[in-house]
Amino acid sequence: MATVVFLALAAIVVYLLMDNRSLEQEKLEMQELAELDKQEMENDYERLTLQYSEMMTQINNDSIIAQLTQEQMRTQQLLQELKQVKASDAREIARLKKELATVREVLRSYIRQVDSLNQVNQQLVAENDRVKDELAQQSQANAGLRQEKQNLTAKVAIAAQLDATGITMTPLNKRQKEAKKMKDCKTIQVGFTIARNVTAENGNRTFYVRIQTPAGQTLTAGTFPYENRQLEYSMKKVVEYAGEEIHVQTFWQVGEYLEAGDYRVSIFADGNMIGTKTFTFK
């Protein structure tokens, strides 16, 4: 008896250690992804600073040079702020990423302004070619970082994706009992279970349920964005998800004739199809 208890306790300890090791691995991968993202932002700021310098050496307009100098100093200040920020500080990283987009757009506006005034001569064109060569070399140096970042991003996204299991579709008659035939169906009940996922972000989730009839038509209550288009859904439900397993029930009030045959139920969340199942009814 003591041996059995010992083996059971040992199995529990091994399971807990393996689960904890998996969580730690996910955390390390997310931290590494954040570091790569921060490094790439630093490279972008340095590249923009270099472009400001090259533009100022070839412009004879004092007013534009003064403006470029001010923008370059601002870019350098943002770079210093970025270097001092920890990669785990999501709020500051997001702010500096937004600032980076603004700096890039400002630089583009100056390039357009200079071109419109026709104050860029052939020497600047040659210098721009040299800068492009330097940027190409820098891009090659960063190619490994970007590829590694893409791989980690894909791994984290896959791990965080929710999974709908145990999908059920039950036709109910006017007494809210299971209908034996679809012609007697007054309500369709669709249930499913969202599996435990400690990697997924906690918070409110909108689940879309899509029911397709044997004729290929969708019982439609509205649309939602999916893969760069609007997709029809039958029911939707907002549920607070905290990483643990939850059960969800949705209902469709029948207002049309439902024929016998195969009905396909698909579940969507966070822009992904997280489960699907086909049911046959008489």
Image (tube, rainbow, N blue to C red):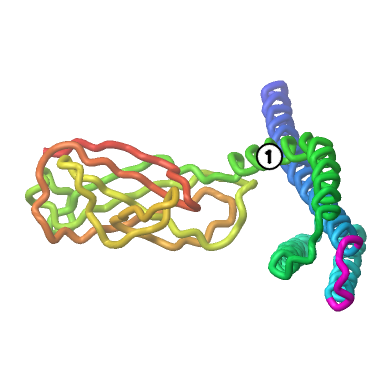
Can the viewer see residue 91? no
Could you tell me residue 172's position as x and y percent? 18, 53
Can the viewer see residue 221? yes
> Looking at this view, is 121 or 72 the one in front?
121
Residue drawn at x 61%, y 43% as measured from the top left: 157
The question of residue 202 being in magenta is answered with: no
Q: Residues within 10 Å of mark 1 (few under 14, many from 20)?
A: some
Q: How many labels, in total?
A: 1
> Looking at this view, is 123 or 62 the one in front?
123
Position of residue 51 relative to residue 139, above or below, is below
Could you tell me residue 227's position as x and y percent? 44, 48
Q: Is residue 158 left or right of residue 65?
A: left
Type of amino acid at the residue the image marks with label 1:
Gln
Say which quarter of the image contains residue 181. top left
Residue denoted by label 1: 150
> Looking at this view, is 91 or 63 the one in front?
63
Residue drawn at x 50%, y 53% as measured from the top left: 270
Q: Is residue 149 left or right of residue 134?
A: left
Q: Quadrant of the N terminus?
A: top right
Q: Is residue 127 left or right of residue 194?
A: right
Could you tell me residue 262's position as x and y percent? 19, 37
Magenta stretch, residue numbers: 57-63
Could you tell me residue 164's position as x and y percent? 44, 43
Q: Quadrant of the C terminus?
A: top left
